[in-house]
Image (spheres, grey):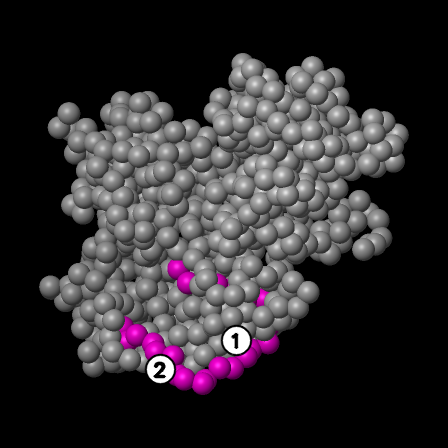
Amino acid sequence: MFRIARKNVLNFNTVEYEIEAPLVAKSCRGGQFVILRVDENGERIPLTIADYDRARGTVTVIVQTIGATTYKLSQKGEGEYICDLVGPLGNPTDLGDCENAILVGGGIGSAVIYPQTAEMKKLGKKVTVIVGAKTKELLIHEDDFRARSDEFIIMTDDGSYGEKGFVTDALKKLLDRGGYDCVFAVGPLPMMRAVCALTEGYGVKTIVSMNSIMVDGTGMCGGCRLTVGGKTKYACVDGPEFDGHLVDFNEAINRSKIYREQEAEHYCRLKGESVKL
Amino acid sequence: MNNVRNKPLVRDASVRSRDFEEVCLGFDAKAAKAESERCLNCKNAPCRTGCPVGVNIPLFISLLKGGDTGGAKRAILADSNLPSICGRVCPQESQCEKFCVRGIKGEPVAIGQLERFVADNADIPLEKAKATGKRVAVVGSGPAGLTCAGDLAKAGVEVTVYEAFHKLGGVLVYGIPEFRLPKELVRKEISSLEGLGVKFVTDAVIGKTLGVKELTESYDAVFIGTGAGLPMFMGIPGENLNGVFSANEYLTRVNLMKAYLETSDTPVYRAKKAVIVGAGNVAMDAARTALRMGAEVTVVYRRSRAEMPARAEEIVHAEEEGIVFHLLSNPVAINGENGFVKSVTCVEMELGEPDASGRRSPVVKEGSEFTIECDMLIMALGTSPNPLLTSSFKELQLGRKGVIIADETTGETSVKGVFAGGDAVTGSATVIKAMGQGKLAAKSILKMFENA
């Protein structure tokens, strides 16, 4: 059993959970993920580590309430327990060669680029952060990003905050300005695909984090397989981060839809609502 | 004396193929008694030579014949730790029963069924020796790890078992379906180990959560029984279409995550027409699971029936349940529509010269392409060892396909005090073979402690 040490509601459907898992906290690094299970009937879901505190023995995940499992999790309060948390899984982010990076976070993905932002800053490297959100309310951890980046750009779809537009609009302006040696993008698959299509034209190395469907997270099920540079790779053990210019995003987007209908049905049943697809 | 063996109770195919309850119900007392009387109690006991752990088969059967089921179980437990499991999943026809003298002029004694009967009908509490003060870490809670842990704990060693999954049992819980091996039995075996003082830590991926070095530093010995968890694919076009799964994924979703139950949050693909590629035990498990999930199922296998590696009983049960076998055929491409599987294109094969394994190797028949419609395709082509642990512990010497090299007579690896066994060493074998290696390693570890 793993205790929820702190729960912080970030906006109407996004919650931050700081969970006690001393062994994971001791060895994890930015870019790695954990798999958790809320209760005995629970599904195993992968979540990227958004932060960790080795002294407190905790890892933090930021979760959007979008399905059955995340809904069940959202019903858990501070001090309550979840059944399982295993990790750290996957490989840590490797931005070792980058001196001047642009970190792009879309939606919930902006939670995930925070450890890398902090780490780059600590190493004395230049880091520019672009985060995208649908509206101002959905923006998370603005102050933390502002404090740890050299430049911080906010894009909202509706223009309710920062600039109106997509992260790729801001990214294009920066790339035109030049001087950047690396882009690290985390967010919805279509966003990462758009970022990679853009950066490829500029010849700037781009790393993406693939949050594929998986069961065990240790290479056993093969559910998370994707095509990278024409070869089959497993997001769990070969990734989750890959050279974005080599990832077959169309295939990845297709694979992310395998259980869409079933999941919608199960979520509605759990909430006692009628099924709407 | 009768040349035909007694038959266990088997649930009717039309009923069992719609649920997940156990297919074979075993012998009743009368059948067990009658079958035990078929044993000739051969002095040289050829059956024992066929058993990877050398169970004293004539002894346990003669005790059973005399009505001493408890004594019979004690006799089995002297060599085997998990008889209720082995009685169900061992390939007896190619092990003990293959050497049974009765088999020469008729059917061999149903040794597996007798083992199961004894295991299910007698409770023998495990006894523990005085504490030695030694501590051992076991990595993996599958058959190899459980066996090693049990033998060490009985000898008074303090054992901690680390398991990557949230549930204990390894392949016994994620791979083998409920209808072939009720999970209650696995749980019972584990709780008897807990009774011996074995500690279990779930959600611990060694190589990630904890390093092997941390284990070697804090324990007197380490046993690695991490199995062979990596699925193989064919490398043919269309393999990443939606609806194409490894047998590992499909079975894990259904068995470990209980996706066949309404209450489970884990989704599972509901197919109308499923094709399973392969003919080993895992292929049979996947086929019969898909059937129970409501699909019409076809098994595609590139060799003939004689070469099918699955246990004979599973093949017969699958046939009875209505699984269609497309033998001597091999997929060459998977075809999709809107990103989902629609059909699989296969070619017919014929058997040529024997290959290195002694099996006749299949050769493609020219111009024999044909297509099978399906909305799910499961690859059950075997597995290879998981490099997660070994890649984080470079001192371990590895062999072909990444198997851990362990001394055949001791189970010790290239690192002193680190032992290994099971599929992590063999690549892919059976529950009983893994158990045998777990036992061997436990014996060597105890010997190492004695000599220290």
The residue that mark 2 highlights is B350
Disc sitting over residue B345 in the figure: 1
Left or right? Give the position of B158 relative to B271: left
* Secondary element at image label 2: strand
Front residue of this view, candidates B68 and A55: A55
Amino acid at pointer 2:
Glu
Discs 2 and 1 share one subunit? yes
Q: Residue at x 52, y 66 (%)?
A: B237
Q: Which residue is found at the position 67% from the left and 19% from the top?
A: A149
Position of B347 with respect to A167 (left or right) is left
Residue occupying the point 44% across, 38% down: B163
Whether the magenta-drawn stretch holds residue B360 is answered as: yes
B364, above or below B8, in the image? below
**View extreme (left): residue:** B44
How many numbered markers are drawn?
2
Q: Mark 1: give few (<14), some (14-19) or many (20+) Cα within 10 Å.
A: some
Specify the subunit that label 1 lies on.
Answer: B
- Give the residue type that dot 1 points to: Thr
Q: Is residue B195 visible?
A: no
* Residue farthest toward the bottom in the current orientation of the protein: B367
Q: Secondary structure at mark 1?
A: strand
Q: Is residue B254 left or right of residue A154?
A: left
Give yes or no for residue B261 being in the magenta stretch. Answer: no
- The image quadrant where one finds the C terminus of chain B is top left
Image quarter (top left, top right, bottom left or bottom right) of the N terminus of chain B: bottom left
Q: How far across and how far down the image is residue A70, in percent?
A: 70, 39
Magenta residues? B359-382
